[in-house]
Image (spheres, grey):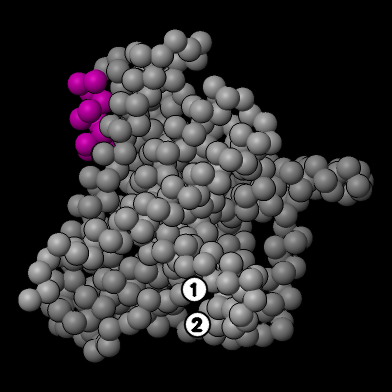
């Protein structure tokens, strides 16, 4: 195969990328704590898109830096080997997460004396009833419980990268047509993956739909797509779409609108069902895609070139606190895979303690904040381990 990769210099980490990926990790953690009151205020409650879009888009951008540069330096074969190694890591992270959560939910049921059967909270009793069939499904990714569905989606999209890189080596236009066509086929319901051996349920996150967002981020970071200009017209258009679409993408916002202007609510409510397919989370409906890109554009403009506005130049206590907070958030963003896997396990544990202690303002606030502190510490520990401090410098 002809190698047509541009020569690139090693890129420094992008502050904006790590910052927003870190924010996504905290939001995803909050969203996965059972019956967590804080979930009422995450982005998913105010529009079509949510933290999943942030995670996938930023992962595409990060992959462009990590894997795209590997392709540019070492060629298609070695770049693909790098991608396959990452797929291997994600695959075993998914398997380990499943068995760890299964283990501690089982331990609560076996050694605890609670009215609730915790193994049923994630519908994992099917695995216990028929382990022989379901363990094959787990390892072949034909058994993907809803709580464990993000990593398989990410893994399949990563596996598409060598094909996308090969196509881009021929033509960026051909690449774009193939990516968009695959997304369209997925949205027509013609390309789905089985999620349960005992039913016809499909993967909650269809990777053939979500790859559009991943490779949008990838293409922007690699320079295949031009950087959008800072334009008053684009800013106003993005704000208008985010604000005006909110009652159609958020039940909470719809109820607010309906309470204030019942006649307007009567006009909006009948639209919900007809646009259902266009706001699909499973296939990444077009409304979710546009909504996220609008938010991403506004965030990109807001933080300034290279994230300059994120960095406070003041010396007061507020600036110092923000500086420390920014370091924590970006560190979490840098270690997103480790943090994601750990936070998914931790979220169920905190939910268990909420069940025992009760859900009030104090317990929920402490539970979320302690969780934030723990996953931040995990990010720092992961970074320390990756630095291999035990290796001799000589």
Residue 309: tell me if it is visible.
no
User: Which numbered disc flags the more N-terminal residue, 2 or 1?
Assistant: 1
Q: Which residues are magenta?
A: 131-142
Q: Nearer the viewer, residue 259 or 212?
A: 259
Q: Is residue 213 left or right of residue 299?
A: left
Q: Is residue 151 left or right of residue 309?
A: left
Q: Quadrant of residue 179?
A: bottom left
Asked if residue 74 is positioned above or below residue 86 in the image, the reply reads: below
Q: Residue at x 50, y 56 (%)?
A: 24
Q: Is residue 136 magenta?
A: yes
Helix, strand, or loop for circle 1? helix
Residue, disc 2: 306
Helix, strand, or loop for circle 2? helix
The answer to whether the residues at label 2 and label 1 have Cβ atoms under 8 Å apart is: yes
Rendering coords of residue 278 (x, y %): 59, 52
Rendering coords of residue 210 (x, y %): 43, 56
Q: Nearer the viewer, residue 35 or 208?
A: 35
Question: How many residues crowd mark 2 within 10 Å: few (<14), some (14–19), many (20+)?
Answer: few
Q: Quadrant of residue 170?
A: bottom left
Q: Nearer the viewer, residue 312 or 163?
A: 312
Asked if residue 196 is positioned above or below residue 229 in the image, the reply reads: above
Rendering coords of residue 167 (x, y %): 27, 73
Query: In the image, which disc is placed on residue 16?
Result: 1
Asked if residue 78 is positioned above or below residue 252 in the image, the reply reads: below
| Prevalent SS, magenta region | helix
Q: Residue at x 31, y 39 (%)?
A: 97
Rendering coords of residue 207 (x, y %): 38, 51
């Amino acid at each position: 195969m002809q190698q047509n990769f541009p020569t690139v210099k090693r890129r420094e980490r992008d502050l904006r990328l790590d910052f927003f990926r870190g924010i996504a990790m905290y939001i995803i953690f909050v969203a996965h704590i059972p019956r967590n009151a804080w979930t009422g205020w995450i982005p998913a409650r105010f529009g079509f898109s949510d933290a999943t879009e942030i995670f996938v888009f930023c992962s595409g951008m990060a992959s462009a830096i990590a894997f795209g540069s590997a392709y540019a330096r070492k060629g298609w074969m070695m770049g693909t080997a790098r991608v396959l190694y990452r797929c291997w890591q994600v695959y075993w992270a998914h398997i380990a997460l499943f068995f760890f959560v299964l283990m501690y939910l089982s331990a609560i049921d076996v050694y605890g004396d609670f009215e609730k059967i915790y193994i049923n909270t994630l519908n994992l009793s099917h695995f216990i009833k028929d382990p022989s069939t379901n363990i094959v499904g787990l390892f072949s990714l034909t058994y993907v419980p809803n709580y464990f569905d993000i990593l398989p989606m990410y893994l399949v999209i990563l596996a598409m990268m060598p094909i996308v890189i090969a196509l881009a080596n021929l033509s960026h236009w051909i690449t774009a047509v193939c990516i968009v066509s695959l997304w369209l086929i997925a949205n027509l319901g013609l390309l789905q993956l089985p999620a349960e051996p005992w039913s016809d349920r499909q993967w909650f996150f269809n990777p053939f739909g979500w790859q559009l967002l991943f490779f949008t981020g990838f293409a922007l970071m690699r320079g295949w797509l031009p950087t959008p200009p800072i334009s008053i017209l684009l800013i106003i258009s993005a704000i208008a779409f985010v604000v005006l679409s909110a009652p159609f993408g958020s039940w909470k916002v719809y109820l607010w609108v309906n309470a204030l202007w019942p006649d307007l609510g009567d006009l909006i409510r009948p639209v919900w069902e007809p646009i259902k397919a266009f706001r699909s989370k499973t296939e990444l409906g077009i409304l979710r895609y546009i909504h996220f890109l609008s938010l991403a554009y506004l965030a990109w403009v807001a933080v300034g070139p290279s994230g300059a506005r994120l960095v406070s130049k003041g010396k007061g206590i507020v600036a110092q606190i923000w500086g420390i907070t920014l370091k924590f958030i970006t560190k979490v963003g840098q270690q997103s895979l480790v943090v994601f896997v750990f936070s998914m396990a931790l979220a169920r544990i905190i939910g268990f303690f909420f069940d025992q202690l009760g859900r009030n303002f104090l317990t929920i606030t402490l539970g979320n904040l302690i969780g934030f502190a723990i996953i931040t510490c995990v990010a720092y520990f992961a970074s320390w381990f990756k630095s291999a401090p035990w290796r001799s410098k000589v």
